[in-house]
Amino acid sequence: MGDWKLIRWLNKPEPVLELFNLTEDEGETSNIARAHPERVAKLLAMMEEEHHLNEHFPMPRIDPGGDVKRSKPKNKKSGKKAK
């Protein structure tokens, strides 16, 4: 959103949010998320609105239910699932 960048790290025990103002901090060295909770909330809402459940690329930390199973791809010729 404009000059702002929000990063949501999901590979930690608890998700981590980082916010950067790219006009003032091109190198993304200062996480200013705590100083701008309203901007974090707005950007996080945008991220959540645009996220779509995908069985081939599950994201259990943020997907509804959190336990989407990957299905095996179907064989193009037979239409059967691969072993």
Image (spheres, rainbow, N blue to C red):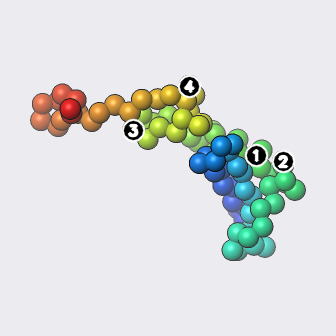
Mark 2 and 3 residues: CB-CB less than 8 Å, in contact? no
Dot label at residue 56: 3
Left or right position of 71 against 57: left
Real-space Cα separation, disc 2 to disc 3, in angstroms = 33 Å
Pointer 2 residue: 38
- How crowded pointer 1 is (Cα within 10 Å; few <14, some 14-19, many 20+) is rated as few
> Contact (CB < 8 A) between labels 2 and 1?
yes
Disc on res. 74: none
CA–CA distance in space, label 2 to label 4:
27 Å
Q: Residue at x 56, y 40 (%)?
A: 51
Q: Secondary structure at mark 3?
A: loop
Q: Residue 77: where, in percent of width, then height?
A: 12, 35
Res. 77 in view: yes
Label 2 – label 1 distance at C-alpha: 6 Å
Q: Give the Cα separation between the discs numbered 3 and 1.
A: 28 Å
| Sooner in the amino-acid sequence: mark 2 or mark 4 | 2
